[in-house]
Image: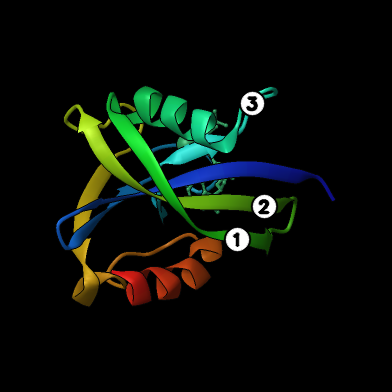
Amino acid sequence: MKTIKVVAAVIKNEDKIFATQRGYGEFKDGWEFPGGKIEAGETPQQALKREIREELDTVIEVGKHIDTIEYDYPTFHLSMQCFWCTIVEGNLVLKEHEAAKWLDKEHLYSVDWLPADIGLIGKIEKDM
Ligand SMILES: Nc1nc2c([nH]c(=O)n2[C@H]2C[C@H](O)[C@@H](COP(=O)(O)OP(=O)(O)OP(=O)(O)O)O2)c(=O)[nH]1
Ligand SMILES: [Mg+2]
């Protein structure tokens, strides 16, 4: 099966993290962490900074690695590296997503996460 390498940003501000709802495609309406596919020649950190600039018009600092999620979707294998991130500059403008929410620990499970993300949420909960 084809493997897709993805990076995802868990953007934290005070006691909340930023979740986004997908606006198009196969997983439309599912909730995720902003990010996307690593392109040839990029480090994960470079890819993540680029993706957040493209999707949210915001500059981030990429911090500690949280986890790498390995998940089999019916048509591909997802390998997703997830990092704690903070905002350096910008206002998180939704260029592609249809909605977003800041979630505190008590509301982490209040959105309909993509299947691959469920395992990650537990880890985030511990570290928040
Ligand atoms: N960004 C992101 N993708 C996720 C998460 N969970 C999850 O299963 N995925 C899957 C959905 C997609 O099939 C795949 C790639 O993410 P993506 O669609 O954001 O990639 P991209 O930004 O490069 O978008 P595109 O140019 O391919 O449309 O990863 C997540 O939390 N964040
Ligand atoms: Mg994306």
Left or right, 124 with respect to 100, comes to right
Q: Amino acid at mark 2?
A: Leu
Q: Amino acid at mark 1?
A: Ile
Label 1 residue SS: strand
Label 2 residue SS: strand
Q: Residue furthest right?
A: 1
Which disc number belongs to residue 78? 2
- Residue drawn at (70%, 43%) of the image: 4
Comes first in the chain, label 1 or label 3: 3
- Residue drawn at (21%, 62%) of the image: 103
Q: Residues within 10 Å of mark 2 (few under 14, many from 20)?
A: some
Q: Marks 2 and 1, Cα distance to the nearest angstrom? A: 8 Å
- Residue drawn at (60%, 32%) of the image: 43
Q: Are marks 2 and 1 in contact (CB under 8 Å)?
A: yes
Residue that badge 3 annotates: 39
Q: How many marks?
A: 3
